């Protein structure tokens, strides 16, 4: 079977159009993937994380010069808030780090007893973790039970 000149030229045009179409489709797919990835990162990491975990504060209350007052207030980034509120170990370490300039805790901040005596309170509506260092039990206090 022989191909004459016009058929050969037509075949060349079809192959060129196919190559252009494939390249255009490939470029379009790359743009879609990059745009989708960036959009997902912005929506998930920025908007959702800020909405869900943003706005948390750690507030330390105590006495200073015989007056009860707020000793410190720290804003938590959304990623830190997520990490410490989802993991009790991280929560305990973070709370101890915040209050270490003021006192040494004599009780585990994650224990139910810490909440019972009012040492640490999580206010979910206001997004506050409130630590009242005046409620730290004295060393050697007998625990109930």
Image (cartoon, helix red, strand yellow):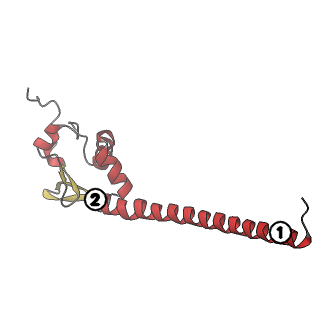
Q: Which mark is residue 56?
A: 2
Mark 1 or 2: the one toward you? 1
Residue 35 visible in rendering: yes
Q: Position of residue 79 (x, y in %)?
A: 38, 54
Image side of residue 19 versus residue 84, left or right: right
SS of the residue at dot 1? helix
Q: Is residue 135 above or below residue 67?
A: above
Q: Residue furthest left?
A: 144
Quadrant where the N terminus lies? bottom right
Q: Is residue 64 above or below residue 110?
A: below
Q: Residue at x 31, y 42 (%)?
A: 87
Q: Position of residue 115 (x, y in %)?
A: 14, 43
Q: Is residue 79 above or below residue 100?
A: below
- In front here: 32 or 60? 32
Say whether marks 1 and 2 touch (CB < 8 Å).
Answer: no
Disc 1 marks which residue? 12
Q: Residue at x 11, y 29 (%)?
A: 143
Image side of residue 15 versus residue 8, left or right: left
């Amino acid at each position: 079977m022989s191909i004459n000149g016009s058929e050969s030229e037509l075949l060349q045009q079809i192959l060129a159009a196919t190559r252009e179409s494939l390249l255009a489709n490939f470029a379009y797919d790359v743009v879609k993937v990059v745009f989708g990835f960036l959009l997902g990162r912005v929506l998930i990491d920025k908007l959702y994380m800020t909405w869900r975990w943003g706005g948390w504060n750690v507030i330390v209350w105590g006495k200073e010069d015989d007056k009860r007052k707020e000793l410190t207030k720290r804003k938590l980034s959304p990623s830190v808030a997520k990490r410490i509120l989802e993991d009790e170990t991280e929560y305990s370490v973070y709370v101890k780090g915040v209050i270490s300039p003021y006192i040494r805790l004599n009780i585990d901040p994650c224990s139910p007893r810490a909440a019972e005596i009012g040492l640490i309170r999580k206010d979910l509506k206001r997004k506050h973790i409130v630590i009242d260092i005046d409620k730290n039990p004295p060393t050697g206090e007998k625990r109930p039970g």
